[in-house]
């Protein structure tokens, strides 16, 4: 299989600029600055590159949302917040191939006439931020960033901006507020960031992996990138597999890979040959699948067809013997902790979901609690400023739809049939 | 403790200021700097950052309390932060938290009487493929077992 990213992520050799350049790094930028801007955008459009931050929005289309007139300066915000539980793929790019990202940023900014880019990296990634700072400094020194980059007459500044611990800051309008030095409260849309974003300026927000794909697209052409994937889903994706599997980790895979193969071939199956119980396919917000549902192509459209999402492609593998009420309760603690509290359906809803799943797990659930959870979810979805409320409701609903009998047993027996442990 | 940036921190602050079109944007980096300089964000530190950035103390307080990484109270020399989200829990995070808690004689949220260790339970650290994970100050410790967490603690104890 042809790879877009992992050739540069195999080991630490490409972390420094010399190693990266030694394998063709920054040649795509050189090519880009000799191309008309519009044709770079056209290649990305042809590539069928879908945003890798979770929502899967086509990157070329999003780039087209920036205003056509250039009277106001524009900003690129790179989303390196990587907060969705089960997701740890961007970290690999940040530590092993930071120049893939820097080059992707430079090309994107050149193509869209953006002169300042901010990389918003989650605060906990201290080491990663340091590596990134180093890469940015190296790129400045080599003339790939800064004034008149590569003699093109184009100026670009890139700044690494550290977050400080808040999942919500991965939501793009929250990211923008946080970058501006405010609490990370998501903003009402419209206006959309493309017209009023960071510092009141037209802003493009893209995920780390999305941008890291751009150099390959420019070097090899959008059509070749598209051909690596499936119909509406170009290229390869970084898939993270976690949980008790033999070989957890990040793998670069074509979009048409089968989910079962991801778990059993690529990640080596469950440790000790344990049977599989459930899979959360694309980060903690995506609806859970039962073991018998995983014979499915792991691309955005096929996953949507079976009622879940490819999301961030962070696959969480859950073995037989796991209490699904306890697992849900862990997730509900998370969302209640991370709700920013602006919208009452989310603030109250996530609080109740935490409370009710907690009491069911503790053997104190009441008849009607399961219906109560489903009701709460209905009242949370689609009624809030951002998608965090939906992100909490989707796992809650799906755990109940798929594992209802476990919730009922907890309530009927007044205890956890699994002995309250993982 | 005097709350004034060292010369190096002051220079770093000035460098940061030049990176943003708006002075307010430097608030998060300035709070990081202040926490590194002063250990935690005391009331004095909040006032100092307000003065530096031109925002009101109430605004700075609002920002500082929104984010989990800013400590408004002193923390131990080593801040142990164990992830309890799902991938880590599936691989024994709860047992690990219990073990560390017992070994140090403190519950999550507490600091040992000698001020050496603070134990916190945190959400996903973005390192689920090497679960279970614990962050100690800036550093990640991954693929932890009870034995390897003991080794980490013993090493930290012997450093002084
Ligand atoms: C609650 C919430 C958290 C999010 N966290 C992240 C994140 O950590 N990283 C990320 O890239 N996108 C995250 N997103 C998605 C962003 O809002 C945005 O769609 C994305 O950064 C766009 O980049 P892309 O089009 O390249 O995927 C989050 C969305 C929501 C609703
Ligand atoms: S949905 Fe939740 S997290 Fe999003 S803005 Fe509303 S309260 Fe905040
Ligand atoms: S669940 Fe612990 S690092 Fe992600």
Image: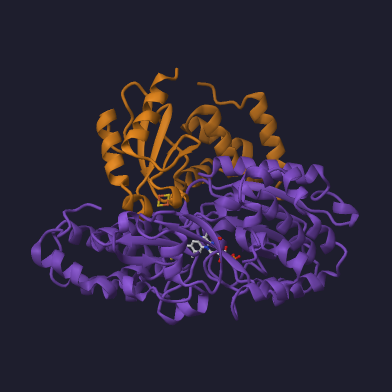
Chain colours: A purple, B orange
User: In the picture provided, is A102 more to the left or to the right than A377?
Assistant: right
**What number of labels is visible?**
0
In this view of the protein, which residue sits in the foreground, B142 or A207? B142
**Displayed-image quarter of ligand 1:** bottom right
Residue occupying the point 41% across, 24% down: B155
Quadrant containing the N terminus of chain A in the rendered view: bottom right
Image x and y of residue A90, in percent: 56, 55
User: Can residue A344 be seen from the camera position used here?
Assistant: no
In this view of the protein, which residue sits in the foreground, A83 or A420? A420
Image x and y of residue A350, in percent: 33, 62
> Would you identify the image quadrant in which residue A295 lies?
bottom left
Residue occupying the far top of the picture: B160
Vertical side of B4 occupied by A166: above or below: below
Residue occupying the far left of the picture: A413
User: Can residue A240 be seen from the camera position used here?
Assistant: yes
> Would you identify the image quadrant in which residue A375 lies?
bottom left
User: In the picture provided, is A239 more to the left or to the right than B103?
Assistant: right
Residue occupying the point 80% across, 50% down: A144
In this view of the protein, which residue sits in the foreground, A163 or A31? A31
User: In the picture provided, is A145 more to the left or to the right than A416?
Assistant: right
Image x and y of residue A4, in percent: 66, 62
Residue occupying the point 70% across, 50% down: A99
Image x and y of residue A43, in percent: 75, 73
In this view of the protein, which residue sits in the foreground, A80 or A73? A80
Residue occupying the point 72% across, 50% down: A158
């Amino acid at each position: 299989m042809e790879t877009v990213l992992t050739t540069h992520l195999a080991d630490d050799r490409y972390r420094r600029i010399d190693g990266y350049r030694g394998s063709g790094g920054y040649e795509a930028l050189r090519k880009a600055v000799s191309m008309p801007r519009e044709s770079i955008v056209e290649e990305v459009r042809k590539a069928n590159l879908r945003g890798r931050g979770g929502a899967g929005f086509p990157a070329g289309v999003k780039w087209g949302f920036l205003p056509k007139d250039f009277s106001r300066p524009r900003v690129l915000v790179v989303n390196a917040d990587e907060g969705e539980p089960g997701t740890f793929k961007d970290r690999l790019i940040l530590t092993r191939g930071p120049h893939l990202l820097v080059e992707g940023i430079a090309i994107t900014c050149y193509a869209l006439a953006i002169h300042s880019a901010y990389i918003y990296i989650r605060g906990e990634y201290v080491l990663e931020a340091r590596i990134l700072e180093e890469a940015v400094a190296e790129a400045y020194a080599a003339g790939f960033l800064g004034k008149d980059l590569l003699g093109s007459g184009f100026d670009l500044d890139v700044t690494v901006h550290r977050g400080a611990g808040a999942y919500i800051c991965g939501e793009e309008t929250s990211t923008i507020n946080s970058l501006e030095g405010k609490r990370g409260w998501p903003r009402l849309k419209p206006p959309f960031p493309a017209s009023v974003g960071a510092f009141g300026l037209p802003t493009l927000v893209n995920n780390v992996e999305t941008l890291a794909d751009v150099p390959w697209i420019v070097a090899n052409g959008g059509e070749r990138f598209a051909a690596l994937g499936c119909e509406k889903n170009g290229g390869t994706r970084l898939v993270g597999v976690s949980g008790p599997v033999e070989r957890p980790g990040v793998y670069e895979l074509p979009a048409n890979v089968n989910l079962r193969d991801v778990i059993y071939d690529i990640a080596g199956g469950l440790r000790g040959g344990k049977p599989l119980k459930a899979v959360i396919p694309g980060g903690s917000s995506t609806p859970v699948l039962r073991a018998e549902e995983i014979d499915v192509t792991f691309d955005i459209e096929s996953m949507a067809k079976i009622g879940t999402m490819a999301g961030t492609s962070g696959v969480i593998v859950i073995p037989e013997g796991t209490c699904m009420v306890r697992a849900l309760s862990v997730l509900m603690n998370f969302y209640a902790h991370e709700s920013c509290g602006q919208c009452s359906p989310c603030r109250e809803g996530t609080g109740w979901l935490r409370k009710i799943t907690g009491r069911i797990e503790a053997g104190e659930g009441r008849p009607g609690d399961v219906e109560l959870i489903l009701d709460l979810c209905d009242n949370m979805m689609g009624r809030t400023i951002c998608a965090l409320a939906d992100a909490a409701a989707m796992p809650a609903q799906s755990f109940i739809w798929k594992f209802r009998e476990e919730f009922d047993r907890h309530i009927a027996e007044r205890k956890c049939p699994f002995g309250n442990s993982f | 403790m005097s709350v004034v940036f060292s010369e190096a921190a002051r220079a770093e602050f000035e460098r940061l200021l030049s990176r943003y079109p708006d002075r307010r944007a430097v608030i998060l980096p300035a709070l990081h700097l202040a926490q590194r300089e002063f250990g935690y964000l005391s009331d004095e530190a909040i006032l100092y950052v307000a003065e530096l950035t031109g925002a009101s103390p109430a605004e700075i307080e609002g920002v500082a309390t929104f984010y989990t990484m800013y400590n408004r109270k002193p923390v131990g020399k080593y801040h142990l932060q164990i992830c309890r989200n799902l991938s880590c829990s599936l691989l024994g995070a709860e047992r690990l938290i219990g073990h560390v808690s017992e070994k140090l004689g403190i519950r999550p949220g507490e600091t040992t009487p000698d001020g050496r260790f603070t134990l916190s339970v945190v959400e996903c650290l973005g390192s689920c493929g090497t679960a279970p994970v614990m962050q100690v100050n800036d550093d990640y410790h991954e693929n932890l077992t009870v034995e390897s967490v003991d080794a980490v603690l013993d090493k930290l104890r012997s450093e002084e």
